[in-house]
Every structure is written in C-alpha cells, then in structure tokens.
C-alpha cells in the first residue's frame, strides 16, 4: 500500500510539473511571436512578467494586446477570466483572491484603444498584486534567453 501511495504521489507530481512546463512553453512562444511582431526588445516581456511596466510605448502596449490574443486571454476583445486565471500561478506565488483582482481590473478600464485597454488592465493587476503583503513573484530571477530561442 505504501508503494502504491509513493507511486501515486510521484505520478501526480510528474503530471503537475509537466502541466506547468507546458503552460510556460505556450506563454514563451506567444511572447516570442509578439515580441518579433511588435519589434520590441526581448527584455520587455520579461519585465512585464515580473510586473515592471516601465516601458509604456505604443509597441509595448500592443505587445500585450498580441500576447493576450495569442494566449486566448481575450477573444474578439472580450476577456476570458477563466483562461487568465489558469496562468496566474506562473506570475505570483499566492493566487488567493486573484480572481477578484482580475475581475476588478477588467471592469475598471474603459479605454477605447485595445492596446491601451490591455496595458491598463495589466497595470491595474500588478498594482493590486504588489499591494498584497508578502506577495512573491513566481518567476523570481527570470532568464531573458527564453525569448530568444525557436
């Protein structure tokens, strides 16, 4: 029975690790595609994933638009909160209450331009997340080279 329990735990961990890696791969592919499409530097998506929105150029904002469309976080300019939330654990360690933050940030911005809208929603998300005590980023020291491979 103990052998079965250990085997089950190992299988579950392997399956979970594979799922996380699969989501990261999709995320990195979308980021690479949109980085090239918008002609921005490779460090911009890496900064965005850590909540650094210091690059607020038109290209950077439209990178986010491309990215959310590629990831199916938005479809036909409509948010898909359940899809967004399925990736939240890749950005922050503690996802408790993230659903409310996402909901609030989506509802709070009414910019007419979709690139601006997505940027504002993302900025709201990180502003809210960073206010939470003891919140840690899931990426930590992020390797910029992940965006530079095919």
Image (cartoon, rainbow, N blue to C red):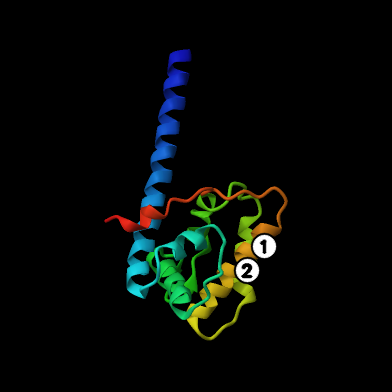
Query: For the C terminus, which image quadrant?
Result: bottom left
**Residue 1 visible in the current orientation:** no
Can you give x and y, in whole percent of width and height, for residue 1 in the image?
46, 13
Marks 1/2: CA distance? 6 Å
- Of residue 124 and residue 99, the one placed in the foreground of this image is 124
Residue under the point 50% across and 59% down: 49
Q: Residue furthest bottom?
A: 112
Which mark is on residue 124? 2
Q: In the picture, residue 43 is in which quadrant? A: bottom left
Check if mark 1's residue and mark 2's residue have beta carbons within 8 Å.
yes
123 relative to 150 in the view: left or right? right
Q: Is residue 75 above or below residue 99?
A: below
Can you give x and y, in whole percent of width and height, for residue 70 in the image?
37, 66
Q: Is residue 120 above or below residue 141?
A: below
- Of residue 134 and residue 73, the one placed in the foreground of this image is 134
Residue under the point 59% across and 46% down: 93
Q: Which residue is mark 1?
A: 128
Q: Report helix, strand or loop for mark 2.
A: helix
Q: Report helix, strand or loop for mark 1.
A: helix
- Within-10-Å neighbours for mark 1: few <14, some 14–19, many 20+: some
């Amino acid at each position: 029975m103990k052998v079965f329990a250990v085997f089950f735990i190992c299988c579950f961990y392997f399956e979970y690790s594979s799922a996380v890696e699969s989501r990261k791969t999709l995320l990195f592919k979308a980021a690479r595609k949109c980085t090239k499409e918008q002609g921005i530097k490779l460090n911009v998506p890496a900064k965005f994933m850590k909540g650094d929105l210091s690059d607020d150029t038109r290209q950077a904002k439209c990178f986010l638009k491309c990215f959310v469309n590629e990831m199916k976080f938005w479809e036909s300019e409509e948010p898909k909160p359940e899809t967004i939330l399925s990736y939240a654990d890749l950005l922050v360690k503690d996802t408790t209450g993230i659903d409310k933050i996402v909901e609030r940030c989506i509802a709070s911005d009414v910019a007419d331009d979709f690139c601006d809208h997505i940027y504002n929603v993302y900025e709201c998300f990180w502003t809210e997340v960073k206010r939470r005590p003891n919140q840690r980023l899931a990426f930590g020291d992020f390797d910029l080279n992940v965006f530079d491979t095919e």
